[in-house]
Image (cartoon, rainbow, N blue to C red):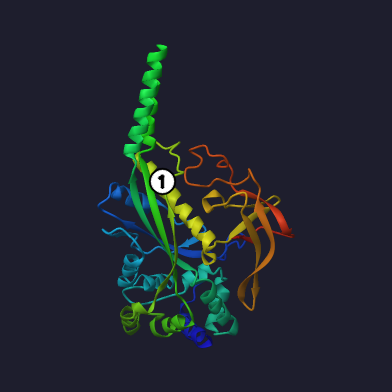
Amino acid sequence: MKQILIALAIVIAPLAKAVAQQDSAMNYRRSSLYSLLVKHNDQKFAQEISNVFLSIPIPDKYNNHDLSVKVVNMSEKLKDTDLIEDFIETNGIASRMVARWFNRDPFTGECNVDTVRARGLYDASEFDKELAARSQRGMAMLEDAGEDLIPNTFLIVNDIRYVDREKTGRAIGAAFRIIGAVAGAATGISNLGDLGDSMGSMMETLKGFKVNVNTYLYQLDWDEETAMTFYREYYASKPDPAKKKAFEDNRDKFHLTYIGSQKSSGKDVSFIGVNLDDPTQMIRKACQRAIDENIASLQKNFDVFKVKTPLINTEPICAQIGMKEGITKDSRFEVLEMVMEDDKIEYKKVGEVKPIEGMIWDNRYMAKEEGAPGSELKYTTFKRISGRDFYPGMLIREIK
């Protein structure tokens, strides 16, 4: 490991640049995420789904690690991960995700550590000074980045398929019309028939759109051997044709590991508050709710994918996390203090909290527009289970 760190320090020392240090209370180390869509051109609404997917942001609990390719066309239905992994390998996705960490110029091969420094929340001047001096402290900073930052880089592949519910919607709509007509004939009140027609049209519209989303989760492989290979053979602090060619010729040395998958049907999505004259809103709401739900489920099911969120206040204890992240009254969180030991960041558990029922923020997409309970809040409020002396900037992470 020491050889790796010295090698990297040597090549990046000439590139030291200063950037402002940000408020540590609201800045914290996030995992990094690349989100990709599988598009099926043969299905209805394929282009509309693709368009709205491109407008869905990376969740703010992650660093945006998107590559230029966001949509992949696949004619076949995904039955397993084989087609996804063929795409990943054929297009060198893992190597491109590594290159993004080091801002690698594809034309010259030149790299820098600006992204590592920014996401690691290192003091810019101290980081650069220690690297230039090749000090023990500088080596520790680089080792810390290699252990806590780059390995926590993920790819999610979202296979979104439209489910045609128009027949169901028309059947329900017809039922409302019949009920209205019968009631009108029996009572002699003509506007009951009109009400039935109105309700019938509404049900045809609201029940006419649904998506099934399968989300597949992958993690970037970044171990000591991979790091050594990259720093020694491919990292270039200035244009270097030989290292540029070496990286291009060895993209297959970098890999992603499959973690697991999650399926969501979007069945609980309400279209209240959606402009029914704009089908794009319905598609966006259905897709984003389903993707957010899948991400929340993957976080619960796989510890490596769990996120940390800072406390924004302690009187009361609150954090900007909510139903979009899958929080319920039964959720439980550990409180972590971020401490620096030997120039490496460690997370020390100092207590536990849980959400207060009725004070859970509904931060799901368009929750305010549908008037959902809790959507008027700006954060979730917690009660202390154990620990004391919490302060803003401490992190919480969900536990089972």
Q: Secondary structure at mark 1?
A: helix
Give the residue displayed 37% in from the left and 28% down from the top. 175
For residue 349, above or below residue 158: below
**8 or 282, nearer to the observer:** 282
Residue 36 seen in the figure: yes
In the displayed structure, would residue 367 be above or below residue 62? above
Compared with 100, 248 (above or below) is below
The residue furthest right is 388
Q: Position of residue 148 (x, y in %)?
A: 54, 72
Residue at mark 1: 286
Residue at 52% x, 58% y is 61
Q: Amino acid at mark 1?
A: Ala
Q: Position of residue 242 (x, y in %)?
A: 32, 84
Question: Which quadrant of the view contains residue 197?
Answer: top left
Instruction: Using the image as rendered, state which of residue 185 and residue 204 is in the foreground.
Output: 185
Q: Residues within 10 Å of mark 1 (few under 14, many from 20)?
A: many
Can you tell which quarter of the image residue 125 is in? bottom right
**Which part of the image, by quadrant, shows the C terminus?**
bottom right
Q: Position of residue 274 (x, y in %)?
A: 42, 37
Which quarter of the picture shows residue 20? bottom right
Please tell me which residue lies in front, 333 or 149: 333
Taking the view exactly as shown, the residue that stands out farthest to the bottom is 3
Q: Residue at image x 56%, y 68%?
A: 121
Task: Tell me which residue sits at (32%, 78%) in the image.
Answer: 248
Please state the horizontal and vertical placement of residue 222, each as a whole percent of the image: 46, 76
Q: Is residue 309 above or below residue 375?
A: below
Query: Is residue 190 visible in this depiction of the protein?
Result: no
Residue 365 relative to residue 208: left or right: right
